[in-house]
Image (tube, helix red, strand yellow):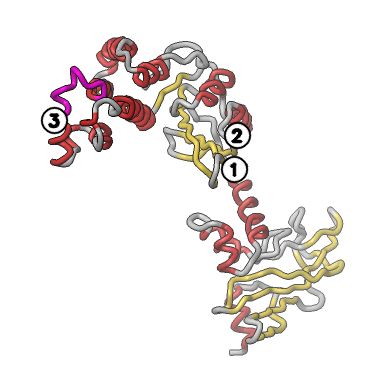
Amino acid sequence: MRDRDLFQQALGLQPPWRVARSEFDAEQHRLDLYLDFPAGSVFVCPECGAAGCKVHDTEDKSWRHLNFFQHQAYLHARTPRVRCEQCGVHVVRVAWARPGSGFTLLFEALVMMLVKDMPVAAIGRMVSEHDTRLWRIVHHYVEEARAEVDFSDVRCVGLDEKASKRGHNYLTLFVDLEATRLLYATESREATTLTAFRKDLEQHGGVVEQVEEFCLDMWPPYLKGIGETFPEASVTFDKFHVMKILNHAVDQVRRAEQRIRPELRGSRYVWTKNPENLSPKQFALWSELDVKRLNLKTARAYHMRLAFQELYTMERDRAAALLSRWYFWATHSRLEPMVDVARALLVSESVPGDLPRI
């Protein structure tokens, strides 16, 4: 079998396209395949689909293809423009690449597969392409996919930030909590990100009044943006962030108290776990310190944290009643970090209507 026939079958070319010749340069690690069509060939009009259109003229084009073993491979073709009696002169759409791309469809498929798990810069180094060219591939297919999404059934939205690089650089992510899918991502974590999300939601068939709930942490700009942009939606503070700030508040109490209570030194991680999760050594230390909880501010703050955690195991009506009592306990504890947490959890002037849920 001649090399041209081999490449013809490997590329899956359909008439009138054929491999006219090939050039291989071992020193440059490069394979070039030149595609052509016989004189007198006719094509389908790319606009109206009319068959039998004659070639008006041609333009030489090239595309980067998948590597041939360790060698870079390129396709070259005299790309015809055909004259259609119905709609004029148009460039024929080749089967191996999309219009305007300098890569074949198979090469782009490889990039899109890799980009799920690798940075684009790393892919660029691996395939010996500048990452700017690869980003054009990614943007094309992401925009194409997003143009088809339907947000008409979005009701519950999860909202959180993610560091995009070192320093205070963040992305804000919006997730459909019912369908478990990413809805929108944008730079920054200011209140204006909610305005951008609302615009994108409406562009994809979403209904603002239909969004019933946002689940998020207690970042004030997010709360402000929800109050201004989604005034009918309720707010739920997710458990992870609530317990995180409660643990931080307990640790603040400990840090302040250990200046006058040296027995608290070295007990930081004792107060961040539930009693059943402590190691034997930690449990012994906790038992010793907890006996003094009437006198230790840290122990009192810790029991407030445990009591709050119990709310998640109760039925809604009972939990609501106990939450009111917990709020009174915390705000009258004279432990400033716990007072601040209680007020942050249950008082939010930036969100109208009922108090946020936890």
**Residue 292 lies in magenta, yes or no?**
yes
Nearer-N-terminus badge (3/2): 2
Q: Does residue 202 appear left or right of residue 265 in this picture?
A: right
141 falls in the magenta region: no
Residue wearing tag 1:
146
Is 260 rendered above or below residue 116?
Answer: above
Q: Is residue 356 visible?
A: yes
Mark 1 vs 2, N-terminal side: 1
92 with respect to 264 (left or right): right
The residue drawn where x is 66% and y is 55% is: 136
Say whether marks 1 and 2 touch (CB < 8 Å).
yes
Q: Residue at x 55, y 63 (%)?
A: 110
Q: Secondary structure at mark 1?
A: helix
Identified by mark 1, the residue type is Arg
On the question of residue 313 being in view, the answer is: no
Q: Secondary structure at mark 3?
A: helix
Q: Residue at x 52, y 16 (%)?
A: 350
Q: Which mark is residue 204?
A: 2
Residue 322 in the figure: left or right of residue 30 = left
Residue stretch in magenta:
289-298
- Element type at marker 2? loop
- Front residue (pair 313, 179): 313
Q: Nearer the viewer, residue 291 or 149?
A: 291
